[in-house]
């Protein structure tokens, strides 16, 4: 019994001895690899943005400056967040909290084309799950995965606010609506050839009007002031 207890007491030390030696991360080297500076053109844009804010309220430019940095770099490394924070004199951790909170900011590299399938109830009822499965099959990706050639990243979102045009797919900053499987396959084929198809409804309608055609304002509207003269006439008792 004593031998068993003694062996158990010595176990942590034996386990620690068997662990491989871990290399230390060189933080300075990491910062060199992810070094960030605004380009001359984007620096002008940043200064133009800051000119819209009083000197004491320039922290209000945090979101647009982070967006500008992300569009330049492709994602937001910690060095980009630090550069933006220094520009508007905000604590580094505060800027990082904002970047981490909003899903529009990305803390790791993603594909050239970021596909986001809406999975809210209206889109789901109109085939959003089919659209997602088609993306998975055509691109050979799972949700939240990026292709090895860094061309595509597949994600899902709660709602794009285009429920009338469901199902909806977001590609970078554009939204593709009224999707069918054949239309989606055509879009993905174009993207594979680096051809960006026009965004918007794929059903032929202009915006979110009824797909069967207009149901109101079917005649030319009357001119300004129509009927006002009748109001001025004395009413007969």
Image (tube, helix red, strand yellow):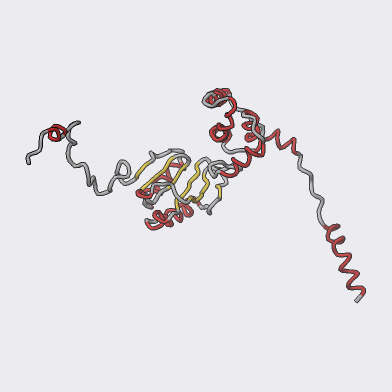
Relative height, residue 93 to residue 163 (above, below): above
Q: Is residue 81 left or right of residue 133?
A: right
Q: Residue at x 23, y 45 (%)?
A: 214
Query: Which residue occupies the foreground of this view, 78 or 143?
Result: 78
Say how many tags the image has.
0
Q: Residue at x 89, y 73 (%)?
A: 4
Q: Is there any visible trace of residue 207 in the rendered image?
A: yes
Relative height, residue 87 to residue 209 (above, below): above
Query: Which residue occupies the foreground of this view, 55 or 176?
Result: 55
| Rendering coords of residue 196 (x, y %) | 43, 38
Q: Is residue 204 left or right of residue 29?
A: left
Q: Residue furthest left?
A: 236
Q: Quadrant of the N terminus?
A: bottom right
Q: Residue at x 49, y 54 (%)?
A: 136
Q: Is residue 126 left or right of residue 30?
A: left
Relative height, residue 22 to residue 81 (above, below): below
Q: Quadrant of the C terminus?
A: top left
| Rendering coords of residue 181 (x, y %) | 38, 52
Q: Is there any visible trace of residue 182 in the rendered image?
A: no
Residue 202 occupies quadrant: top left
Q: Residue furthest right?
A: 2
């Amino acid at each position: 019994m004593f031998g068993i207890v003694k062996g158990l007491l010595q176990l942590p030390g034996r386990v620690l001895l068997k662990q491989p030696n871990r290399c230390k991360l060189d933080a300075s080297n990491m910062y060199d690899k992810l070094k960030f500076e605004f380009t001359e053109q984007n620096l002008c844009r940043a200064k133009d943005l800051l000119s819209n804010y009083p000197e004491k309220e320039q922290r209000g430019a945090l979101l647009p400056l982070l967006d500008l940095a992300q569009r330049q770099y492709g994602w937001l490394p910690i060095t980009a967040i630090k550069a933006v924070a220094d520009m508007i004199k905000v604590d580094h951790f505060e800027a990082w909290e904002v970047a981490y909170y909003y899903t529009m900011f990305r803390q790791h590299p993603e594909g050239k084309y970021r596909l986001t399938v809406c999975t809210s109830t209206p889109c789901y009822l109109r085939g959003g799950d089919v659209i997602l499965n088609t993306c998975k099959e055509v691109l050979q990706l799972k949700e939240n995965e990026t292709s090895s050639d860094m061309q595509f990243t597949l994600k899902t979102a709660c709602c794009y606010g285009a429920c009338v045009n469901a199902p909806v797919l977001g590609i970078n900053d554009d939204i593709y609506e009224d999707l069918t499987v054949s239309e989606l396959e055509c879009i993905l084929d174009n993207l594979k050839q680096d051809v960006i198809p026009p965004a918007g409804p794929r059903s032929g309608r202009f915006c979110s009007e009824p797909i069967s055609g207009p149901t109101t304002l079917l005649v030319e509207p009357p001119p300004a002031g129509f009927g006002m003269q009748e109001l001025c006439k004395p009413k007969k008792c």
